[in-house]
Amino acid sequence: MADRELNILSLDGGGVRALSTLHVLKNIMEAIDRENPPKPCDFFDMIGGTGSGGLLAIMLGRLKMDIDQCITGYTRLCKHVFSRKKRLSLTGMGSMSNRSKSKSKHEGKRLEFALKSILRELGHEDKDMLLQDVDLSCRVFVCVTDASTHKLVPLTTYPSKYCPIELYKCTKTWEAGVAAFAHAAFFEPITLGPSRRRFMDSSAQANNPIREVWIEAKNVWRLTSLESQLRCMVSIGTGLPTIKRATKSSGVFGFSTKTAEAATVVDPEVETNKFIQEHSELDDDGRLFRFDVPNGLAEIELDALGEMETIVDATQDYLAKELVYKQVRRCGKALARPASSELSFRR
């Protein structure tokens, strides 16, 4: 492979806030070609994600959806999954121990139904199609966590030394989507593979999976250093918190919050800073881009359907800022390979 040909995309988790991710990505694709924005799968050689970002990686990379399709499908999925909370059984209501065993707020079956509906609408007759893919033009890497050991396990569309062979051979596309999306506070883990182990999302281990995606890419493209092969790496978050204050009720972010997510999720920007320190030459060369909406978007709860319009509005305000606009344009140029040089980058 020629030097500097690889484009890699890393997507954070964030529940409904993943709509922000999609609108940022939409602008990046329009920066490549405003008149005919390409599909992400046509420009990225690998798309990796965790949580909702893992689900988006499957939709964009494995199912090869365009951005508008994905925005529509993901919005509908969230509304279907989060519009109805799980009912407590009479037995559970009468017993504190039973309540503690069933902490999930939402029904995993509704998520399964929504994902199978997307497969059907895209023309996939086999709703149980496997995650593995013979088309390796866009590899998909999804972070999930073993519910028993709490170790991060990758699910991939291609053979990988880090993905257990039994999971690679038998995991269905919708199962991988459920496992990636199944935040411990909202869903029960899903059972995968012949060994019947249970898996959930990896928010606690890698809510910003940029380093995990990098390690996986190094495993895939091993002929020379990944740095020499990389054209552009893009990382997209799902929002930053407001000012950090040390309070008695502070979560791990350092600010007071009532969200269930805060007790388990590591600040995604810590991972971003570590990665930039480790790969400063990529940033210096204009081959590394990170986009993340500021001003408290991170404090919107994962299942806050009523905040979806706010998420989109805040993202559009962020993208309209001149410095961000220029950064998006630079990102579009960095992604475009020489064969795409005829594409217009004018405003």
Image (cartoon, helix red, strand yellow):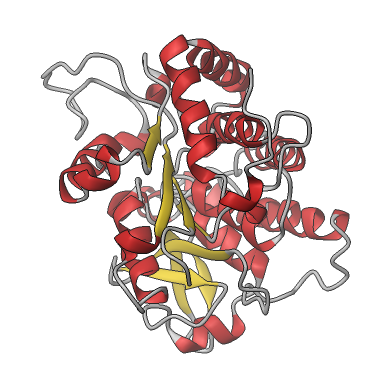
Q: Is residue 315 above or below residue 177?
A: above
Total numbered badges shown on the rendered structure: 0
Is 215 left or right of 178, judged from the image as shown?
left
Q: Is residue 102 above or below residue 343?
A: below
Q: Quadrant of residue 305?
A: top right
Is 145 left or right of 245, judged from the image as shown?
right
Residue beneath the point at 63% across and 58% down: 61
Would residue 146 be seen by someone viewing this image from the given angle? no
Q: Is residue 214 above or below residue 161?
A: above
Name the residue nearer the viewer: 84 or 307: 307
Q: Quadrant of residue 300?
A: top left
Residue beneath the point at 52% across and 45% down: 335
Q: Quadrant of the C terminus?
A: top right
Residue beneath the point at 42% across and 63% down: 144
Q: Position of residue 134 (x, y in %)?
A: 67, 79
Residue beneath the point at 50% across and 27% down: 328
Name the residue nearer the viewer: 75 or 284: 284
Would residue 8 be seen by someone viewing this image from the given angle? yes
Q: Position of residue 24 (x, y in %)?
A: 55, 30
Name the residue nearer the viewer: 217 or 112: 217
Name the residue nearer the viewer: 100 or 119: 119
Is 94 left or right of 78, judged from the image as shown?
left
Is 56 left or right of 34, judged from the image as shown?
left
Q: Position of residue 21 (x, y in %)?
A: 53, 35
Q: Position of residue 197 (x, y in %)?
A: 44, 78
